[in-house]
Amino acid sequence: MTGPARRIEPLAGRVDAEVVVPGSKSITNRALLAAGLAAGTSRLRGILVAEDTDAMVSCVTALGASVTPGPGATTVTVSGVGGRLPAGPRTLHAARSGTTARFVAAACAAGPGPYRVDGAEQMRRRPMGPSFDALRALGATVREQGAAGHLPAVISGPARGGTVRVRGDVTSQSPRACCWRGRCSGTAYGSSSPRRWCPGPTSS
């Protein structure tokens, strides 16, 4: 989408200012999911607030974690499920976020399900086939409700784990997504002590 044209005037002198760099969307989404799956409480500071990260917050919450905003607009506290996902049926909406859709789909394979993963029309057109094939190879049930290899899909587990080959030529998110299933293998993981994550370069 192209916005209105803006006129930029050259600066007449030296600049003395502080610039706050936004957090990373990619790192924020990974931190949100990791905190949601972990045991105990995690505080994420310097997160990016955007449509894609809002989608991840929605999905993490649907899987049983709690996400509490503040203090400030770029900090949240997440209480995780300790690797034990609640039984379905539950619906998770990834909006237009491919990272959210693929990572959450893999995480869903750790729980009993059924979990319905869907997204906006744009996300429904993006490929999910390699991720679905990998989850099926690990023992999860994946049932597309539309075109094969695309959202929406209903996922049930738990997948048994093991070794799987994943195509990485369609999207690099597919092999990375399988790592989330590995993190949920077996019993709960993580500690009960609070943790701090810093997705943004301005965090401390």
Image (cartoon, helix red, strand yellow):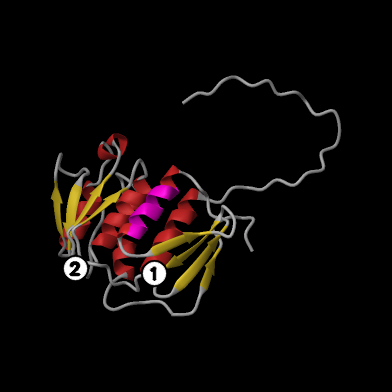
Q: Secondary structure at mark 2?
A: loop
- Give the vertical position of 22 relative to 155 (above or below): above
Residue appearing at x 18%, y 70% in the figure: 160
Instruction: Estimate the x, y position of residue 45 in percent, counting from the top left.
Output: 56, 60
* Left or right of residue 171: residue 88: left
Residue receiving disc 1: 80
Q: Is residue 57 magenta?
A: yes
Q: Amino acid at mark 2?
A: Pro
- Residue at point 34%, 70% (across, down): 81
Mark linked to residue 158: 2
Residue 195: image x %, image y %? 51, 72
Tell me if I can see residue 51 in this picture.
yes
The image shows residue 123, relative to residue 59, as above or below, that is above
Which contiguous range is marked in magenta?
53-61
Crowding at dot 2, Cα within 10 Å, few <14 / some 14-19 / many 20+, comes out as many
Residue closer to the observer: 81 or 164: 81
